[in-house]
Image: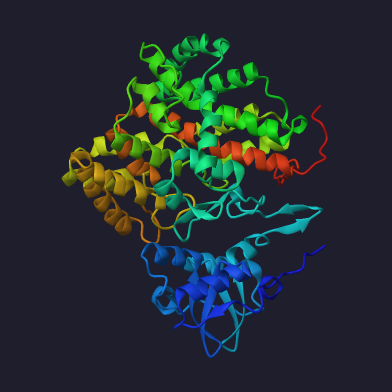
Amino acid sequence: MTATVRTVADLMTSPAVSAGPEETLEAAARRMGEAGVGSVVVTEANRPVGILTERDLLRATAAGSAQDAVAVWMTPDPHCVGPDVEVAEAWKDLAAHGYRHIPVVVAGELKGIVSMRDLMGVAELRPVEGAFADVPRGLKGVIVAETEIGEVRGLEGFYHYRQYSAVDVCTHYGFEDAWALLVDGHLPDADEAAAFRAEVAPLRRLPASVAEVLPAIARAGLAAPGGAGSLDPLRTAVSLLALAEGFRPSLDVTPERLRADGLRLGAAVPTLVAALHRLAQGRAPVEPREDLGHVANYLYMLHGAEPEPMALRAVEAYMSSTIEHGFNASTFTARVVTSTGADLGSAVVAALGSLSGPLHGGAPSRALDTLDAIGTPERTEEWVRDAIARGERIMGFGHAVYKTYDPRSAMLRDIAREMGGPLVDFAQQVEATILSTLVELKPGHELHTNVEYYAGVVMELAGLDRSLFTPTFAAARVVGWCAHILEQARDNRIIRPSARYVGPPPPQPLPR
């Protein structure tokens, strides 16, 4: 049976929320909030002349320009479509222009608006025998679940934790505040923040049954393919901790018990990372302190001394900014495992396995390896040209989702500049040359600096060994995994997609 072709008219919101170009941003923001929409169409005589998005409002607010006219911050001359355009074509059209919202017009007059979210839900999906086929490889752009935890808007260079800009949260709040936001659904006030810190700080200590096995795990990790920077020891230690704590299937426990399991792992993983690192170096682990903040305690356990303020700020900004980042491979893995009703420890161990892949984790140290290989600024262009000619990937550049500058990289670049020094100057010179060379050699490709580039720089300046970069990423991301595990368990349905069989047609006679 042939599926009905859907058009923009089936999905658009009509009438669209609109604003005049001379109205203030404050008035437009109020209208967007009342309607619960992410953009307004700027019109003159009911003809679209611009688009104003939440991202524009955030930028304007940061600049203290809430009383500016809408025309100052809008994207002018928006691309428009007619209501009879097929959904798949509208989606491709929108992606090609790098927008998230398209006004729908008839004879030039505004009739409605359709968003990328509206289109992605149905584009390229055709019902076949009760399943879905013709899904893009890797599920790219396919909506597989609903979440209240956060979102990555790759075309806008923006991501958020719940309703707040993630960069704003990382800039103005501490790690535990972001943790509480993702797990409990709101930014804590002063009393709530103190209570949350008091709740998680005692959870950092390891059971004796786990601590006594860590030396053997650390020794085995040194022989692993990834050496000291491998996630294999951490994966094994997390599995052991979950066993020692008696984590039960998520299907069989209360939300409160599952939350407690998540806080336990989120608090204990940095302890595991620090202990395994020191043991691999032949040094004794340092016991955690409850009087220090989460990241300060992590650095204390690594080095045996309280961190300098600038180093703490740099690492906390990095870890806070990597807690959550949409339905990436490891987060999706955690939700798939949780959907089976498995325990939280199993889901986190599976997510760690996903993160261990070179295409997902591990790039911060590789970005620094690139700087080492280049050596001096004048060698950058030649090195990049040779690497591209060999078909090699330039680590620290390009992203699967962001088609503009990675906002995490922008934040960490500012912190690196505050830290200063020859490495920062060198990194900025190399970045500029790589970007200009990529524009020349890969025209039409959106390759911008991603989070790993300056993450490597700030962690190196903060005194972290390169073998710690990926485990530190994991120590932060476990918080986001656990938030997603809690969300999946609250409204669960087993994730069981279909595959298209492409082998020889059955049935065929068995060979004799």
Compared across the picture, whether 372 is left or right of 183 comes to left
Q: Nearer the viewer, residue 106 or 130?
A: 106
Q: Nearer the viewer, residue 179 or 46?
A: 179
Where is residue 312? Give x, y as percent.
Answer: 34, 35
Compared across the picture, whether 266 is left or right of 375 comes to right
Please state, as top left, top right, bottom left or bottom right, where the N terminus lies in the image. bottom right
| 496, above or below 146, in the image | above
- Quadrant for residue 393, please give it: top left
- Residue under the image location 76 percent in, 57 percent down: 127
Compared across the picture, whether 490 is left or right of 471 comes to right
The coloring applied to the image is: rainbow
In this view, which residue lies farthest toward the front?
191
Please state, as top left, top right, bottom left or bottom right, where the C terminus lies in the image. top right
- Residue under the image location 54 percent in, 19 percent down: 237
- Quadrant for residue 251, please give it: top right
| 415, above or below 118, in the image | above
Where is residue 451? Give x, y as percent.
Answer: 39, 45
| Total number of numbered discs in the rendering | 0
Compared across the picture, whether 168 is left or right of 498 comes to left
- Residue under the image location 61 percent in, 32 percent down: 262
Where is residue 425? Give x, y as percent.
Answer: 20, 45
